Amino acid sequence: MESTARATVIAFIDALNNEDFDAARELLSDDVTFKGVLGSRDGADVYMQDMRKMKMKYAIKKVFVDGSDVCLYYDITQGEITFFSSGWYQVNDGKIKTFTVLFDPRPILAAQPKK
């Protein structure tokens, strides 16, 4: 199970990096739940709509696996901003069912236009 969960998450990150959003979508459960520092998303199609717009790039630093749980440390680049982050992915039946991403949001918030 560990190698399958790891392979699923790595394939998902690789697909996002390659902007192969259809392949990334195939690795998500239809009812995937995403929780992040700046919001949450319910459902694979809703999540992937955001990913198509943001086009984030991931540089994996470390992978930890415990059964069907996979934790990644990675640098995420969005536009001109790169920030260190951790993602906890839970895989069920070969698809990502839930994931939580934690990071310090200050670089992103500082880059947003002032109102």
Image (cartoon, rainbow, N blue to C red):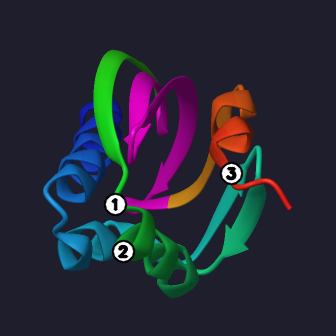
Q: Residue at label 3?
A: 112
**Front residue of 38 and 46:** 38
Q: Verify CB contact (< 8 Å) between mark 1 and mark 2.
A: yes
Viewer-nearest of discs 2 and 3 = 3
Q: Is residue 99 above or below residue 43?
A: above
Q: Residue at label 1?
A: 55
Check residue 72 for magenta coloring.
yes
Check residue 60 for magenta coloring.
no
The residue shown at (27%, 57%) is 16
- Density class for disc 2 (Cα within 10 Å; few <14, some 14-19, many ≥20) is some
Segment tinted magenta in the rendering: 67-96
* Residue 43 coordinates in the image, percent (x, y): 60, 81
Q: Verify CB contact (< 8 Å) between mark 1 and mark 3.
A: no
Q: Residue at label 2?
A: 52
Left or right side of 33 for 16: left
* Residue 61 coordinates in the image, percent (x, y): 33, 14
For marks 2 and 3, the one nearer the N-term is: 2
Amino acid identity at mark 3:
Gln
Residue 65 got which mark? Answer: none
Amino acid identity at mark 2:
Arg
Q: Verify CB contact (< 8 Å) between mark 2 and mark 3.
A: no
Give the quadrant of the N terminus: top left
The residue shown at (19%, 64%) is 19
The residue shown at (55%, 34%) is 87
Q: Is residue 92 above or below residue 103?
A: below
Viewer-nearest of discs 1 and 3 = 3
* Residue 53 coordinates in the image, percent (x, y): 42, 73
Amino acid identity at mark 1:
Lys
In three-dimensional space, the C-alpha distance between marks 1 and 2, rounded to whole angstroms, equals 6 Å
- Density class for disc 3 (Cα within 10 Å; few <14, some 14-19, many ≥20) is few
